[in-house]
Amino acid sequence: MENFRSIRSDMEEVAALFDNVTYSMRKQWKQMAGEGSFWEPILAFVHAVDWTEPWLIALMSTHIVLLVLAVLTRRNNNAQMTLFFSGLICVYFAERLNTILDRNWKKFARQPYFDRHGVFLSTVWSMPLLCMTTLVLVNSLFSLAKLMVKWKRAELRHRARVAREKKE
């Protein structure tokens, strides 16, 4: 009984912490959005970017190719893990890439998209890569679950065969 009270008090503390965090996030979002709707800052970002720049078209095409590749190789675990770790490595180096691109943006872009916080690069570089790696991770978990079911069935068949042989 004492354990249940302890668990309940821990759960209440976690719930209170979660409420505080979500309240803080909502408050910050409202400040960022200027008390506007959810879509206003997103639409402002989309309209501020010149999506016809060749390097942005190439980047988005690369992300589409990687996503298609992730879907096409969904049954090949080695290819999936290569995509997964490559995507995570690219996200890891996003900060350094942002610094390099910030220094050299005049060579390839018409506008200075790259700030010291890396918001733009996080949006157009890291977010699609993280979505792709999440897709690969979910696929790997499904493959693992199928493998575990297959393994358990084989184990049960083996036990049944051993039990039959003992009876005979």
Image: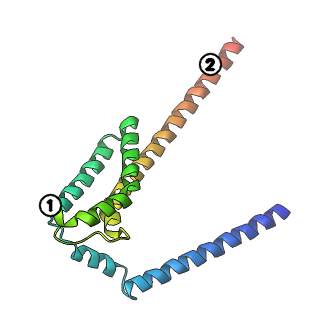
Q: Which mark is residue 117?
A: none
- Callout 2: 10 Å neighbours few (<14), some, many (20+)? few
The residue at the point 23 percent across, 72 percent down is 112
Marks counted in the figure total: 2
Q: Under tag 2, what secondary structure?
A: helix
Residue 164 image point, x, y percent: 66, 17
Residue sitting farthest toward the front: 103
Cβ atoms under marks 1 and 2 closer than 8 Å: no
Residue 44 image point, x, y percent: 27, 79
- Callout 1: 10 Å neighbours few (<14), some, many (20+)? few
State the residue position of label 1: 54
Q: Quadrant of residue 163?
A: top right
Residue 40 image point, x, y percent: 31, 81
Above or below, 39 relative to 52: below
Residue 81 image point, x, y percent: 41, 41
Q: Nearer the viewer, mark 1 or mark 2?
A: 1
Q: Name the amino acid type tagged 2.
A: Arg
Q: Under tag 1, what secondary structure?
A: helix
The residue at the point 41 percent across, 53 percent down is 134
The residue at the point 49 percent across, 83 percent down is 27
Quadrant assignment for the C terminus = top right
Above or below, 28 relative to 122: below
- N-terminal label among 1 and 2: 1
Q: Quadrant of residue 129?
A: bottom left
Q: Name the amino acid type tagged 1.
A: Pro
Q: Which mark is residue 161?
A: 2
